[in-house]
Amino acid sequence: MSTRGFTGRRPPEATRERLPPGQYLTADFPVLQIGPNPRIDLDAWRFTLRAGSRPLKIWTWDEFNALPRTRWGGDIHCVTKWSKFDTAWEGVGIDDLLADAGVAAPTAFALAEGYDDYTTNVPFADLTGDRAMVATHYDGAPIEPDHGGPARLLVPHLYFWKSAKWLKGLRFTQKDEGGFWEMRGYHMYGDPWREQRFTGD
Ligand SMILES: Nc1nc2c(c(=O)[nH]1)N[C@H]1C(S)=C(S)[C@@H](COP(=O)(O)O)O[C@H]1N2
Ligand SMILES: [Mo]
C-alpha cells in the first residue's frame, strides 16, 4: 500500500475542500505590493466615484464613515498561492456607496484605483450584491497601512490582487480595461476556483 498522502504534508479533508486548486493554507498575512506604502493623511483622504474622468461623488473620511457599515468573514486567496481562512473585515458595502451617491452603475466595468497609482479591474456585478466592500477594519481594528489602511477594496471571491489597497476610488469604464497586473499578464477576471491566474487560464 502506498504511503503517499500519509506523510503529514497533505492537509486534512476539511481544509482541502476550502482550498481552491493550487493553493496552500497559511496562518500568516503576507504583505504584497508594487511599491512603498503611500502616505495618507485622513484630513486629505477622499474617496471618489467616477464615470470615466467625471466625478459622480466624492466622500471625505468623515462622510465615508457616516455610511452604513457591513461585515464579512471568510477565506481569501492570493495568486502567489497562499490562502488564509476565516478573515474578518468591516467597512462600507459597494451597494451602500452607490445608494448614497444616488447613481446607478453607468457601465458594467470598474477600475479600482489606489493612492499608490495601482489599478485593478473588476466587473461591476462582482462589486455589488453584498460581494465587495471598501474595508476599513480587519480583525476588529483599523486596517494597518501594510494591508491597505485606511481603506482598501475587498473582493474576496476573486484573487486578492483585485482587492486594491489604499483605495482612492472606483472608476466606471466603458470597456473592461486591464489594471496594473492585468496589463502584465494576470487574468482579467481572476476566479481562484477556476484557477484564473494568468491570461489564457
Ligand atoms: N494599492 C495597491 N493594492 C494592492 C497591491 C498594490 O501593489 N497596491 N497589490 C495587490 C496584490 S498583488 C495583492 S496579493 C494584495 C496583497 O494584500 P496584502 O498585502 O494585504 O496581503 O494586495 C493587492 N492590492
Ligand atoms: Mo498578488
Image (tube, rainbow, N blue to C red):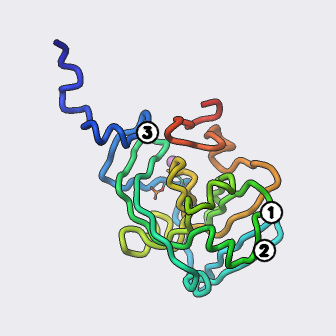
What residue is shown with label 3?
20
Q: Earlier in the sequence, mark 1 or mark 2?
A: 2
Looking at this view, name the residue that lies furthest to the front. 129
Please tell me whether mark 1 sits on a helix, a strand or a loop.
Answer: loop
Residue 173 location, quadrant: bottom right
Position of 127 with respect to 73 (left or right) is right
**Whole-percent x and y of residue 76?**
44, 52
**Whole-percent x and y of residue 26?**
32, 47
Please tell me whether mark 3 sits on a helix, a strand or a loop.
Answer: loop
Q: Earlier in the sequence, mark 1 or mark 3?
A: 3
**Whole-percent x and y of residue 135?**
51, 69
Relative depth, front residue between 177 and 20:
20
Circle nearer the viewer, 1 or 2: 1
Question: Of the residues shown, which amino acid type is indicated by label 1?
Answer: Pro
What residue is shown with label 2?
56
Q: Disc 1, disc 3: CB below 8 Å?
A: no
The quarter of the picture where the N terminus appears is top left
Please tell me whether mark 2 sits on a helix, a strand or a loop.
Answer: strand
What residue is shown with label 1?
106
Q: Residue at (62%, 64%) from the top-left corner? A: 114
Q: Disc 1, disc 2: CB below 8 Å?
A: yes
Q: Residue at (52%, 50%) from the top-left corner? A: 157
- In this rendering, is residue 144 above or below 109? below
